[in-house]
Image: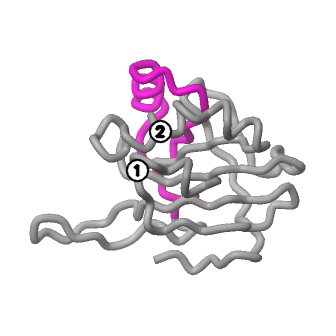
Amino acid sequence: MTHLQEGAAAPVFTATDQSGNTVSLADLKGKKVVLYFYPKDDTPGCTAEACNLRDNYELLGVKGYVVIGVSPDSEKSHRKFADKFQLPFTLLADQNNAIANAYGVWGEKKFMGKTYMGIHRTTFLIDQNGMIEKVITKVDTKNHTEQII
C-alpha cells in the first residue's frame, strides 16, 4: 500500500499524544524510531500488537528504539487504551489522517464484503538520520517485536 521505500526520507510530522503532549519526528533526530500504524484502539489485533511491543519494550529500548503508535483515534481513546494495557510508549492521535496519508497507509480496505477507508497496518523503522530503514507491511501482531529486530 505505502509508496515509501527503504532508504527514503521519513515524512516529518507533529501530533499530540495520549497525554496531550506535542510530539514531532524532527525532535527525535539522532534516535531510532519504530513508527507503527494500527487501525483502532482496544480491538483484538491492535491490542495484541501493542501488548507485544509493551512486553518487549525494554529490549527495543536496549536496541535503541523509541516506539510510537499512530491511529485515527482521539487522545482520550489513546489514554484509555494505554492505561488499560499499561502501554509505556507514545500513541499519537491522527484524527485527520495527515500522518497516515504522508506515510501512504490510509486507503481503501475490505472486510466482510464491505469497502471502507482505513489504516493499513504498517510499521516503519526510521534511523537516527530520519531515513526509512525498513518497512513492515505484513505485520504479525503477536510477534511484531521479532519482525522489528
Q: Name which quarter of the figure residue 57 lies in.
A: top right
Do tag 1 and tag 2 residues touch (Cβ < 8 Å)?
Answer: yes
The amino acid type, in three-letter code, at marker 2 is Asn
Q: Earlier in the sequence, mark 1 or mark 2?
A: 2
Dot label at residue 33: none
Q: Residue at x 40, y 46 (%)?
A: 142
x and y percentages locating residue 82 in the rendered image: 47, 26
Which sits in the foreground, 89 or 108? 89
The amino acid type, in three-letter code, at marker 1 is Thr
x and y percentages locating residue 136 in the rendered image: 54, 66
Residue occupied by mark 2: 52
Task: Give the SS element for disc 1.
Answer: helix
Q: Residue at x 40, y 30 (%)?
A: 77
Q: Residue 82: within the magenta?
A: yes
143 left or right of 27 in image: left
Residue stretch rendered in magenta on the structure: 72-100
x and y percentages locating residue 71 in the rendered image: 46, 48
Residue occupied by mark 1: 141
143 left or right of 10 in image: left
- Tell me if residue 94 comes above or below residue 16 in the rendering: below
